């Protein structure tokens, strides 16, 4: 009786294993060899900073003219990004302002841009580490620091006064730009917008201090540029070096 019970138990276990295996295969849950190595394809490796910049300019032109393209947000697209990994062609450092969404402004889709958004588009260790990850690990060939007109963070810094909570840490990052513009002797009504431009330049300088960024720039694999977004027209102007 005991031996008979053990034989029946073994049969049940074998059947259960077979059924489980087939259910995993038909459900698409079986172990797959198609795992992400997070290595860019040859085509992705050949995308230069100039190519990336052109894609951004063309996308922004479509946005300005309200002729944006339909984006693939299907399950298949999401699955492809999940399996193959992400290889964004550009890193966009922009202000957190709700009116300045990079993916829309540049008419790009899922997986195209690596976005880092922080009030005043300032650079701190966390945002710099994010940039380093994108350019070193993901192979993005272009970093764009995008400020925008009428930036509230710059305005608050210019007006001075006490900044509550942790807002003061943002103000401290922007303050050198405001002080430099004021010291240059420009008219008072020009300080605000000039300080926005100077703040973009300061952010670029902070990024370029990174040994990882410095090495990639020196080898010609990376370019860091500034840009400014116009809230009214929707146009992005890339700043000359």
Image (tube, grey):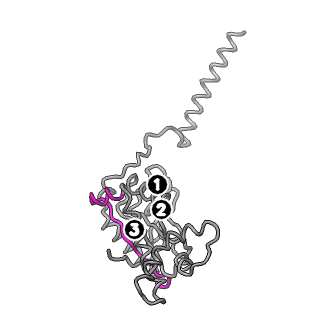
Q: Nearer the viewer, mark 1 or mark 3?
A: 3
SS for callout 2: loop
Residue name at image x 43 percent, y 62 percent? 112
- Assess whether residue 232 is covered by the magenta stretch: yes
Q: Which residues are magenta?
A: 213-234
Q: Is residue 27 above or below residue 192?
A: above
The answer to which of 232 and 97 lies nearer the viewer is 97
The residue beneath circle 3 is 204
- Assess whether residue 177 is covered by the magenta stretch: no
Q: Is residue 156 above or below residue 50?
A: below
At which x and y percent is residue 158? Answer: 53, 80
Precedes in sequence: disc 2 or disc 3: 2
Instruction: Please state if 211 lies on the left or on the right of 67 as rendered.
Output: left
Instruction: Please state if 13 lies on the left or on the right of 101 as rendered.
Output: right
The answer to which of 211 and 98 lies nearer the viewer is 211
Say which mark, if any, is on residue 23.
Answer: none
The residue beneath circle 1 is 81
At which x and y percent is residue 218? Answer: 28, 59
The residue beneath circle 2 is 110
SS for callout 3: helix
Precedes in sequence: disc 1 or disc 2: 1
Circle 1/circle 2 CB separation < 8 Å:
yes
């Amino acid at each position: 009786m005991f031996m008979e019970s053990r034989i029946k138990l073994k049969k049940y276990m074998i059947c259960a294993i077979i059924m489980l295996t087939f259910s995993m295969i038909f459900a698409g849950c079986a172990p797959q060899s198609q795992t992400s190595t997070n290595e860019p394809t040859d085509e992705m490796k050949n995308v230069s900073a100039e190519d990336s910049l052109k894609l951004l300019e063309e996308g922004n032109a479509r946005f300005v003219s309200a002729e944006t393209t339909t984006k693939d947000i299907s399950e298949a697209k999401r699955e492809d990004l999940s399996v193959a990994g992400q290889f964004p062609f550009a890193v966009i450092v922009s202000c957190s302002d709700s009116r300045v969404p990079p993916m829309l402004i540049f008419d790009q889709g899922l997986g195209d841009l690596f976005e880092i958004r922080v009030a005043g588009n300032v650079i701190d260790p966390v945002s710099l580490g994010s940039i380093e990850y994108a350019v070193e690990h993901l192979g993005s060939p272009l970093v764009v620091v995008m400020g925008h007109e009428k930036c509230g963070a710059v305005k608050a810094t210019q007006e001075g006064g006490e900044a509550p909570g942790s807002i003061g840490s943002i103000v401290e990052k922007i303050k050198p730009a405001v002080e430099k513009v004021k010291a240059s002797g420009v008219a008072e009504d020009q300080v605000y917008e000039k300080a926005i431009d100077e703040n973009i330049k300061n952010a670029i300088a902070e990024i370029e201090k990174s040994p990882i960024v410095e090495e990639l720039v020196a080898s010609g694999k990376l370019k860091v540029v500034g840009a400014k977004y116009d809230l009214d027209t929707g146009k992005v102007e890339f700043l000359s070096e």
